Image (cartoon, rainbow, N blue to C red):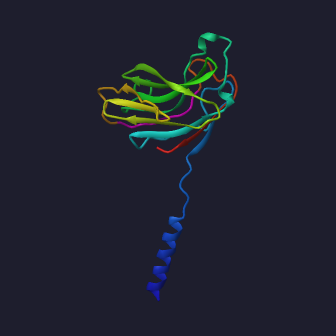
Amino acid sequence: MKLICQLIFVSLSVLFIGCEDEPDFARQFVILKGEHFASPRLVETLQSNRLIFSATFDTSCQYVFSETSFQDSKNKLLGFADCNSMHHENSARFVWQWLHDRLEIYAYCYVDGARVEEFIGVVALEEENRYEIELLNNAYVFTLNNQEPVTIRRASTCNAGVYYMLWPYFGGTLPAPHDIHISMKITY
């Protein structure tokens, strides 16, 4: 009788474990007017050599600065620090800007302290897009919606590291001119 009870318990345990929902990594980020950092503020590390996610920008991501010299400032979307260093030393991430009445996406890296930017493409508002950063031994490979990838050199002194995540951030210099909303789903 004891063996039958144990078998029933194990069978039910497997049944219920098999029915658990997959974790939901969908997140809504808000950068409040006058702020740089998005809410929620998270602390996580990347546990893979690929960061894969989808993001949707809504109409709140349109903005025009009265000081036009700041209009081409890059706003950070998602990425990671690299090489056991701070993100202004070594990192890779997607960034965006509202310029020429369109939302432009860039690859944005720090490599041994030097900033490198490269235009990737344009995305439509209210449309979900797929982003991927692949971490190779000597390069970061950025892909937007299966378009032609953009490759940026990785630091030559880096072959391993702790990769802490870099979450949405508005600017550079100027803070968000109004509340900014971005939806993301991380699939790693």
**Residue 132, x across and y down, in percent:** 46, 36
Is 88 on the left-hand or right-hand side of 40? Answer: left
Relative to 113, 42 lies left or right: right
Residue at the spot x=57%, y=16% of the render?
72
Q: Where is residue 108 in the image (x, y as percent from the top left)?
A: 46, 24
- What is the quadrant of residue 85 in the picture? top left
Q: Nearer the viewer, residue 113 or 66?
A: 66
Who is closer to the viewer here, 100 or 89? 100
Tell me: residue 130, above or below residue 8: above
Point out the residue furthest to the bottom here: 1
Image quadrant assignment for residue 86: top left
Position of residue 18 measured from the top left corner of the image (x, y, whole percent): 50, 65
Determine if the magenta segment contains residue 143: no
> What's the magenta region?
161-169
Predominant secondary structure, magenta span: loop
Number of marks in the rendered image: 0
Name the residue rendered at 57%, 37% in the picture: 55
* Residue found 70% across the figure and 25% down from its top: 178
Relative image position of residue 159 (x, y in whole percent): 30, 34
Residue 91 in which image quadrant: top left
Identify the residue at image location x=42%, y=30%: 149
7 vs 185, nearest the viewer: 185
Left or right: 111 as drawn, with respect to 185: left
The relative height of residue 119 versus residue 26 in the rendered view (above or below) is above
Q: In this view, does 140 lie above or below 47?
A: above
Q: In this view, does 125 lie to the left or right of 155?
A: right
